[in-house]
């Protein structure tokens, strides 16, 4: 059976999800939406995706711009088995009320939405089975995905008494000029703990984690400093070997010149994937250290692309009987994750 997938919102995440779905032999992109006739709308058509208007009242704007559309979002929802909602923060909940609740279609929301919009939050490694057969699921954010991948592995191998994480968040995506700071470091949020820890608990409910966060004037990646108290003794080499077994975690070395997210961005450009996308946590191998029973390391989180494989796995969990292991292997292979 081919799963018919609609993408509502052909932006930073949506266009990457569409490309990833198109690479799967058990899925088909039946259409994508834009609310306005932008260059991304034109690009979607040029790439062979059927374009629909995300706001029915805006259909005439596409006609005036000379951009062919197949209809509006209601027409698209009639064509699909599942819709991946990649609309801006908060719009997914609005779309649920305006469109999705009236249809029999299944829905995936992204991490900018609250857990309550779907009632189930998803990370492939941590809780694939929770999404099986569900009508609505939320794929957690890039930060939560990155933390869940690493902490799930560590918890299974060594046990975690508590995890304390400081997040350094990029201010905006590279293609956006909507937010700052331009020159500053901003506690974001100003309160401790931040919302990231509770969000990890939506997929790893028993994990003792507290997080805090800053926003800085950077655009390409987030960075995390993890401080973890372990249940069992471990060595830095054991942790490195553990991470090497996880295809969605990549060890990088400062000693190779990868000393910051700037060098990691250049590394990603040379890696050979479209849009210099990285689907992996980028863990600095040099940073992995043990003091007593505490583990420390740094990781970088490519916010534009990290959640793309999770979306593909979530589609399979919701719409097929493919196992976690089979889905993740297939996703990794098609996206070039080794």
Image (cartoon, grey):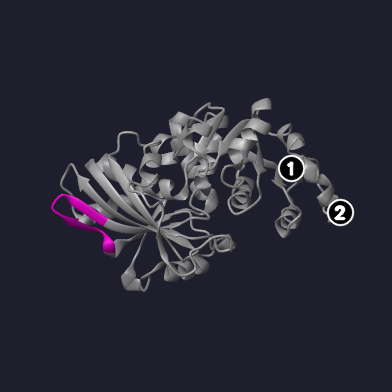
Q: Position of residue 236 (x, y in %)?
A: 21, 56
Residue 32 is tagged as: none
Residue 151 figure quarter: top left
- The residue that label 2 is drawn on is 64
Whether residue 235 is situated above or below residue 124 in the rendered picture = below
Highlighted range, magenta? 287-296
In this orientation, which residue lies closer to the viewer: 322 or 124?
A: 124
Whether residue 114 is situated above or below residue 35 in the rendered picture = above
Q: Residues within 10 Å of mark 1 (few under 14, many from 20)?
A: some
Quarter occupied by the N terminus: top right
- The residue that label 1 is drawn on is 55
Whether residue 231 is situated above or below residue 63 in the rendered picture = above
Which SS class for mark 2?
helix
For this view, does 298 lie left or right of residue 234? right
Residue 104 in view of the camera: no
In this orientation, which residue lies closer to the viewer: 334 or 65?
A: 65
Determine the residue positioned at 30% across, 34% down.
206
Determine the residue positioned at 76% across, 54% down.
37
Residue 166 figure quarter: bottom left
């Amino acid at each position: 059976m081919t799963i018919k997938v609609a993408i509502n919102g052909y932006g930073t995440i949506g266009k990457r999800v569409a490309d990833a779905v198109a690479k799967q032999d058990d899925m088909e992109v039946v259409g994508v939406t834009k609310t306005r006739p932008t260059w991304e709308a034109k690009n979607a058509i040029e790439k062979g995706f059927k374009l629909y208007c995300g706001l029915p009242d805006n259909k005439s704007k596409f006609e005036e711009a000379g951009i062919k559309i197949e209809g509006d979002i209601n027409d698209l929802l009639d064509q699909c088995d599942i819709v991946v909602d990649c609309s801006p923060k908060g719009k997914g909940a609005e779309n649920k009320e305006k469109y999705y609740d009236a249809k029999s279609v299944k829905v995936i929301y992204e991490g900018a939405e609250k857990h309550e919009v779907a009632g189930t939050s998803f990370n492939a490694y941590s809780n694939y089975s929770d999404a099986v057969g569900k009508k609505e699921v939320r794929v957690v954010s890039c930060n939560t995905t990155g933390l869940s991948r690493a902490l799930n592995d560590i918890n299974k191998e060594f046990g975690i008494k508590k995890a304390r994480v400081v997040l350094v968040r990029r201010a905006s995506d590279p293609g956006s000029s909507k937010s700052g700071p331009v020159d500053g470091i901003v506690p974001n949020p100003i309160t401790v703990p931040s919302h990231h820890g509770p969000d990890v608990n939506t997929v790893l409910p028993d994990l003792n984690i507290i997080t805090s966060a800053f926003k800085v004037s950077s655009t390409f990646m987030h960075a995390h400093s993890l401080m973890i108290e372990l249940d069992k003794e471990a060595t830095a080499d054991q942790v490195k070997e553990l991470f090497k077994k996880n295809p969605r975690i990549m060890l990088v070395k400062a000693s190779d010149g990868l000393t910051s997210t700037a060098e990691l961005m250049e590394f990603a450009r040379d890696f050979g994937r479209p849009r210099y996308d990285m689907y992996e946590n980028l863990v600095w191998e040099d940073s992995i250290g043990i003091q007593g029973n505490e583990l420390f390391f740094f990781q970088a989180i490519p916010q534009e692309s990290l959640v793309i494989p999770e979306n593909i796995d979530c589609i399979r969990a919701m719409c097929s009987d493919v196992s976690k292991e089979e889905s993740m292997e297939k996703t990794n292979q098609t996206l070039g994750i080794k």
